[in-house]
Image: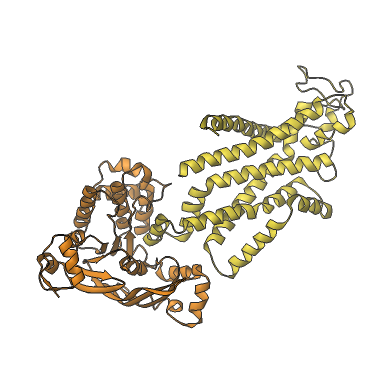
Chain colours: A yellow, B orange
């Protein structure tokens, strides 16, 4: 990909990411009562000045539900990304540097977690515990810890023999500072950004997927992009807006987060070289 | 000669290679006095870098056997670094255990060497550009060194001292250099900055491991001159490792010549310069190649 295209991609995906962030924050503060929103006078209206994206089968404003639907994945997604990156970064730094039984045990544990099929494990968890989106997000974050830990560990091991790390050691800089600041913070941030964006996208994917399927996700009348898409089953072709808008939102958001994470990371890695 | 700062006795370093155990440093002994410059002269593979890096516990990879004594004479008395590392001295189950895991060896070294790194000795390597953190400005790296040497300083005082160090290594426009990254500077400037970072840590012994390798001839002369100027006050000792006999003669008070892991001869730099005394044939050939008076070949 040429620099021009990747710049354009960065701007477009960045705009979506920023928009999702802003909408996600706004949705946290605007009041919405799904029961109040029902209006039998305006079922399945097409887009208009009053309802920019039309109304759904119960007369509820689609745009409003789209905005409010971000609540289901926004904070959970951030939380999942943060858990994966912080725990994965620390675990990677530790396993890349330490030795001894504790390290071996941690490496084993990470490998074990890495073998779990993520989606199956999450659905399984939902069947034995009360399903909730925050729980799912935490678990999704934990399931990505091995992935992050592995890339960070490789980086730590590769940098360990660099001249400047040897020089830092010789100068008596503390190992914790070398590891956390010089390696994890300065060298690994691009890959941490990439992983955080990926996990955010993954949480959105799982949340909307489970909400679409119905049993474990967000339940009607609370809005989720997933259960909004699920309305397609009841509309029988009567109107496209109520499910098309969230479907497009899901695809565009996930794609933008993945692209943004990748492009930012690639730019960062280019700058490191 | 004043009291020794560091003395190395019978140092042996062996590596396990696929062709079996190979002895790379074979019974090396030398010492450095306080304020003294000891030149270590030798070709690549002579074991000069390895024996000096072992002082810092920075022997790369997985040496099979390290034995001998590396004695540091500090204010708190005498310490033998290798005696502090019992598990690596040859033989025994501990050695086998660590062979399985060279990180464990690094941890043991780290525990032992931590109080000495930086404070007792530190090093300046070849490849100055690779020796500086590529993602940190020169100033911030110097700040780390300065604040480790004197933790009582506040931020502004640390930075002021950092800039002062850049001035002392004769960098023009130290403020601009402090704000630069290694890749924005020339090799010679990087090496000056590296010397500043090392010296700002206030070590009693500076190990310079071929610090001019890879630099232009004129820059090399400048760096060697800088070392001379910085060491004039005799507050620090230096081990100057080089394959360039002229550099060593310019800086050193005493010289040891190494080849194939052994010390061939030890002599005063003055005698070498003036062609006095009997010379080992290898030293004689080095002198001859550099167009210096050989004196009497043994």
Q: Position of residue B34 (x, y in %)?
A: 23, 69
The number of callouts visible is 0
Left or right, B56 with respect to A257, comes to left
Q: Nearer the viewer, residue A241 or A175?
A: A241
Quadrant hosting residue B255: bottom left
Q: Position of residue A162 (x, y in %)?
A: 43, 56
Q: Residue at x 57, y 47 (%)?
A: A192
Furthest-front residue in this view: B19
Residue A208 in view here: yes
Quadrant hosting residue B268: bottom left
Q: Nearer the viewer, residue B72 or A243?
A: A243
Furthest-bottom residue in this view: B92
Q: Nearer the viewer, residue B136 or B147?
A: B136
Quadrant hosting residue A113: bottom right
Say if B152 sits above or below A236 in the image: below
Q: Residue at x 89, y 20 (%)?
A: A41
Quadrant for the C terminus of chain B, please.
bottom left
Q: Nearer the viewer, residue A262 or B144?
A: A262
Furthest-top residue in this view: A49
Residue A218 in view here: no
Quadrant for the N terminus of chain B, please.
bottom left
Left or right, A241 with respect to B76, comes to right
Q: Position of residue B12 (x, y in %)?
A: 36, 76
Q: Position of residue A65 (x, y in %)?
A: 77, 30
């Amino acid at each position: 990909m040429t620099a021009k295209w990747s710049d354009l991609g960065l701007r477009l995906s960045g705009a979506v990411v920023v928009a999702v962030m802003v909408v996600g924050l706004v949705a946290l503060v605007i009041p919405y009562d799904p029961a109040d929103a029902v209006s039998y006078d305006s079922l399945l209206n097409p887009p208009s000045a009053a309802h920019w994206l039309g109304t759904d089968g119960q007369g509820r404003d689609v745009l409003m539900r789209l905005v409010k639907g971000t609540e289901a994945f926004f904070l959970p997604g951030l939380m999942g990304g943060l858990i994966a990156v912080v725990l994965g970064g620390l675990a990677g730094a530790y396993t890349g540097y330490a030795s001894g039984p504790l390290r071996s045990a941690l490496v084993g544990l990470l490998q074990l977690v890495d073998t779990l099929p993520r989606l199956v494990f999450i659905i399984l968890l939902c069947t034995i515990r009360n399903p909730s989106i925050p729980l799912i997000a935490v678990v999704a974050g934990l399931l990505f810890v091995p992935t992050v830990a592995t890339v960070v560990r490789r980086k730590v091991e590769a940098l360990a023999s660099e001249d400047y790390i040897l020089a830092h050691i010789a100068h008596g800089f503390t190992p914790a500072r070398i590891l956390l600041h010089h390696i994890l913070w300065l060298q690994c941030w691009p890959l941490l950004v990439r992983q955080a964006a990926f996990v955010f996208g993954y949480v959105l994917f799982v949340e909307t997927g489970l909400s679409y399927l119905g049993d474990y996700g967000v339940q009607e009348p609370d809005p989720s992009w997933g259960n909004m898409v699920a309305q397609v089953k009841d509309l029988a072709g009567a109107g496209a807006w109520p499910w098309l808008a969230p479907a497009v939102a899901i695809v565009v958001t996930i794609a933008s987060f993945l692209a943004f994470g990748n492009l930012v990371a690639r730019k960062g890695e280019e700058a490191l070289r | 000669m004043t009291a020794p700062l560091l003395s190395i006795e019978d140092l042996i370093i062996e590596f396990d290679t696929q062709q079996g155990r190979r002895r790379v440093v074979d019974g090396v002994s030398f010492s450095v006095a306080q304020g003294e410059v000891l030149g270590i002269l030798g070709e690549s593979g002579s074991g000069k870098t390895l024996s000096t890096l072992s002082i810092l516990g920075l022997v790369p990879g997985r040496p099979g056997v390290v034995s001998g004594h590396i004695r540091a004479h500090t204010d708190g008395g005498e310490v033998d670094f290798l005696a502090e590392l019992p598990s690596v001295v040859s033989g025994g189950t501990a050695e086998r255990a660590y062979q399985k895991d060279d990180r464990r060896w690094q941890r043991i070294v780290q525990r032992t060497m931590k109080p000495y790194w930086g404070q007792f000795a530190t090093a300046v390597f070849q490849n100055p550009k690779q020796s500086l953190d590529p993602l940190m400005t020169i100033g911030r790296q110097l700040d780390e060194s300065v604040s480790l040497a004197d933790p009582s300083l506040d931020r502004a005082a640390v930075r002021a001292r950092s800039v002062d160090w850049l001035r002392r290594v004769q960098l023009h426009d130290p403020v601009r250099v402090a704000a630069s990254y290694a890749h924005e500077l020339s090799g010679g400037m990087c090496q000056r900055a590296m010397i500043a970072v090392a010296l700002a840590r206030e070590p009693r012994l500076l190990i310079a491991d071929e610090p001019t390798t890879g630099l232009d001839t004129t820059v090399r002369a400048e760096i060697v001159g800088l070392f001379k100027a910085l060491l004039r006050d005799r507050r620090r000792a230096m081990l100057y490792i080089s394959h360039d006999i002229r550099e060593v003669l310019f800086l050193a008070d005493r010289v040891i010549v190494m080849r194939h892991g052994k010390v061939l001869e030890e002599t005063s730099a003055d005698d070498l310069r003036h062609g006095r005394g009997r010379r080992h044939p290898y030293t004689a050939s080095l002198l001859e190649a550099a167009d210096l008076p050989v004196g009497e070949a043994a």
